[in-house]
Image (cartoon, grey):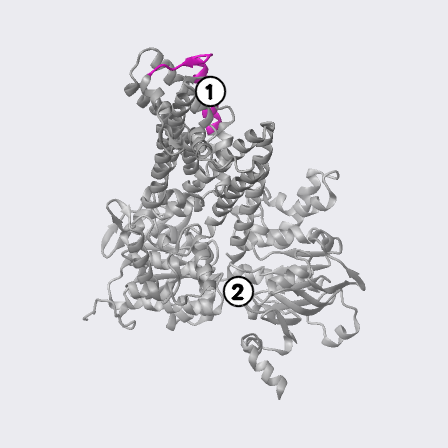
Amino acid sequence: MTTLDTASVGQTNTLAYKYHAFMSRRASLMPTFAAIAILVLLFVGAEIFLRGDFITPRNISALLLDNAPLLVLAVGMTFVIITAGIDLSVGSVMAFTGIWLAKLLGDGVSAAIAIPLVLVGGALVGMLIGVLVQYFDVQPFIASLAGLFLARGLAYVVSLSSIKVENDAVLWLQSTRWSAGGWYITPTGIIALLVVVIGAFVMHFTRFGRTIYAIGGNEQSARLMGLNIARTKVAVYVISGVCAGLAGLLLTAYSGAGYPRNGIGTELDAIAAVVIGGTLLTGGRGYVLGSMVGVFVFGAINTVINFMGAEQSWTRIIVGLLLLLFIVVQRAIVARAERRG
Amino acid sequence: MVVEPGPRLDNGDVDQARPLLELTGATVRFGADAAIDSVDFRMFPGEVHSLMGENGAGKSTLIKAITGVLPLNEGVLTLDGEELRLSNPVDAQRAGISTVYQEIELLPNVSVAENIALGREPRRLGMIDAKEMRRQASRVLHELGLDIDPASLLGSHSVAVQQLVAIARAISADLRVLVLDEPTSSLDVDEVAELFRVIRELKQRGVAILFVSHFLDQVYEICDRVTVLRDGKLVGEYLTRELLRIDLVHKMLGHKEAELKERNRPAASDIEDAEPLLSARGVTHAPRIRDANIDIYEGRVLGVAGLLGSGRTELARAVTGVDHLHTGVIVVSGAQQDFTSPRKALNKGIAYSSENRRTEGIVAELSVLENIVLAVQADRGIWHRMPPARQRELAQSWVEALGIRPADLDRPAGTLSGGNQQKVLLARLLALAPRLLVLDEPTRGIDIGAKVEIQNLVSELADNGLSVIFISAELEEVLRVSDRVAVLRDGRIVDTLDAADTTVDAVLALVARPSSDEEDEALT
């Protein structure tokens, strides 16, 4: 049967043929490639502009450290968006789990109990949204907006002001730096990268992951194919909730305190990173690794603006323009696909 | 009588074989109405069976009953002698009953191999074994004679290939009954031939196939047996080879005859003198339509014949301002026009009805009334809202004039049958009092009775002075309705004929002639 494989795939080895075969298989990777190109351009541009002061091990290591919570949020968001849903609650859930964790630790609860507890808290908010979406047929936008208000309110219920964290285990996540040369990585960074790896694995090598793509492609068809739609759709919101809970932990470790006003608008940053990374808001196409690239583009723009000493508002403007660009590129890709179909 | 089981059944003997699938006394009700009423239906292994009937006869309900989409209110479904109780399509698939729908129910965003394997992917250590999955897909595709890369995205292939992939998905499981619901409605001649080759192959394997199509030719080409339904009741089951076409049509329509009105064809000589209402010269919208010349006279019907992809739709879109001309001139009543939008064409009295009734025509959620007044209201602008009583009067008059059934103005248009939706669309355009109506496949996917009504309607309209461009894949229909027929091939008008003096075979010869013949002709 291998002969068949080669017969149908490798008839010719010309470059044009290879390009064609690649495009027919991986056309949806193009926006992600564009994101990688932009990331490279950003780095090279900043390096030239700042006369060799930008691409340093320290800066790149800091990029992961500073954006670890956003990265975790973006992974969860990717799951949801590929089913053609959206989760607006993640910024608030991150704030809620962060402040709740700080409160629990302050009350003397051990980290081994407090951390699983806040993750379950995130999962429950996610499950609520998932159940609303799946069984009550509520628009994901509205259901997760309810989740946003709920989680933000819960954060204020826990505390109206910031709570400092003195738990060694949690502070260890941030303060430990394993370094080699000028490079370093913290446990928070490792957790974020692990989430990316697990996310990508689940997406591509499990039936659950392929069902997520199927739902995004055409939910009705996926149902007719006998896939378990209900369970999968609730599960993606639970995953997003758990990721938001984990991001709460990372953020609390990062800032050394829980604060109920954390993460206002962060859900939008996460969505922006996912879209820049090449995931289609209409569902069905996208990659977890792309979202990671998106987060780094987002983070790099922030860093560049910082270095240039410009106003932070410029970050928003540039991210806004990039988003526009990506949405237009994606539209073009989808339009091309429709013309063919 | 000894009946040979196994994959190779002689079709002469199947009558004696045991039916693979049998439905007895099936009744499905919606509220008080029975969509099908104690219908018996059976399918034999290795046989292609067709289900015929007008829209509303209960065909789709019966299909839904045997594929688990709708539950039976009464009656028994058996597969291989065992009773089946299906509560959803997945149950049916598990039992070996697969369906390939008219609108392809696959996923454009994942690979061909995954579309075939989804839900039953080969796994190793709990992970999907992508290599094995592609290998299996490649084997099934090969069996169907389809040489495509299993790793390519489904959406990168043509509709015909996607349909074959849907069949590949069905046969890669344990397939016993395959239901093909209008599989050929969007395929061209070659693709249909390819599909039929696959159907014959499946027949050899002993699969029972239900082939539902509006195309009589195809039914007669591929089907062994026909079950006819009318008004939810069984008319009878017949062997195709023993049933004359005319008898089949009579059985489908019942006592109402498919009466065809003859066009009052004006003499061709009249046309010579008159000035054309619309005259197009050198119309080009590369690469689909090149250098097309057409003339349309008042009160005449110009038919456009050609295969799918020959440029017939592009021609219609070009003269109605939907697509911009690359080159070419359009003259209406002696004045040159620059149609940059359908609105400009509408202002000159040129209305276009798209071939995609569902996506570019009917607004399914709006009522019949709202659908009919839509264009008139848009024409008046939002500041000149038509009073509700006037709207109702207008819509009512069109519903009566065109015989739209049910004559309920407030019913959502999406719940009407295809033929009646088409009439609602016609009413919408006619309410604008156009001078030229461009109808792109107005009879596609509607039953024979409604087809005839639409054809008669077009003839009447033309007799009343309206000009019509009538595009259809069915040549008989084009010839019947039109005064003149423009024959398209590969984006060029190869000839324009008088409909009265030509035959389907003559047009077919033009359509099917390979381009190289023409060059030879030019040389000699």
Residue A150: say if magenta. yes
Which quadrant of the structure image shows residue B496?
A: bottom right
The CA span between labels 2 and 1 is 70 Å
Residue B346 vertical position relative to residue A296 in the rendered view, above or below:
below
Left or right of B159? Residue B24 is left
Badge 2 vs badge 1, beta-carbon distance below 8 Å: no
- Residue A110, how many percent across, how many down? 29, 16
Specify the segment rendered in magenta.
A144-167
Residue at the location (43% across, 36% down)? A80
Q: Secondary structure at mark 1?
A: helix
Q: Residues within 10 Å of mark 2 (few under 14, many from 20)?
A: few
Question: Which label sits on residue B257?
Answer: 2
**Dot 2: what SS?**
loop
**Labelled disc at residue A152:** 1
Q: Nearer the viewer, residue A222 or B108?
A: B108
Q: Specify the subunit that label 1 lies on.
A: A
Residue B197 is left or right of residue B4, and the answer is right
Q: Is residue B238 visible?
A: no
Marks 2/1 same chain: no
Single out the residue that lies furthest toward the top.
Answer: A107
Q: Is residue B409 above or below residue B142?
A: above
